[in-house]
Image: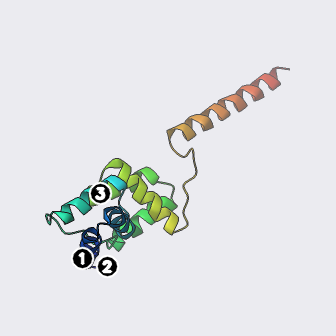
Amino acid sequence: MAPDKLDNEILNLLAAGKKIAAIKRYREATGAGLAEAKEAVERIERSELTAPEPSADSDLETQIVSLLGRGEKIAAERLYRERTRTGLKESKEAVDAIGRQHGITVPAGSGCLGVFVLLAVLVTGITLVLAAMKF
């Protein structure tokens, strides 16, 4: 959807007194988080800024899908933040939404805690093997 068309949709909803619907529509069109969408709708309402083209950067989406496919969610969020200049929460929500759209789920525990748990399991296993060898 072109930015002007989205702006018009948002302005029509605002004119009808449907600010919450306008924020929801903006989020659907752009993948923005709630706070970001609210701010954007208010800027549109004040005619300060036109809405960005929703997820039109297919290169960005392709890169995010690639990173998510390799389990690099944090890198995907960082890339999204750099390209869109959104906050951490909004970037996380957008990356999660892109992942869901493409059927990609990053397993829980794939961050630092996951590494810690893996190390703990390895150390426990090695300890048990060494203890068994003493008998």
Which label was assigned to residue 38? 3
- Residue 66 in sight here: no
Badge 2: few (under 14), some or many (20 or more) residues near its Cα, within 10 Å? Answer: few
Q: Front-most of 7 and 131?
A: 7
Which label was assigned to residue 36? none
Q: Secondary structure at mark 3?
A: helix
- Residue 11 in sight here: yes
Q: Amino acid at mark 3?
A: Lys
> In the image, what residue occupies the spot 22% across and 77% down?
4
Q: Earlier in the sequence, mark 2 or mark 3?
A: 2
Question: Residues at badges 2 and 3 in contact (C-beta under 8 Å)?
Answer: no
112 horizontally vs 85: left or right: right
Check disc 2 and report the residue beneath it.
1
Badge 3: few (under 14), some or many (20 or more) residues near its Cα, within 10 Å? Answer: some
What's the CA distance linking mark 3 and mark 1?
16 Å
Q: Quadrant of residue 121?
A: top right
- Quadrant of the snapshot with the C terminus: top right
Front position among marks 2 and 3: 3
Which label was assigned to residue 8? 1
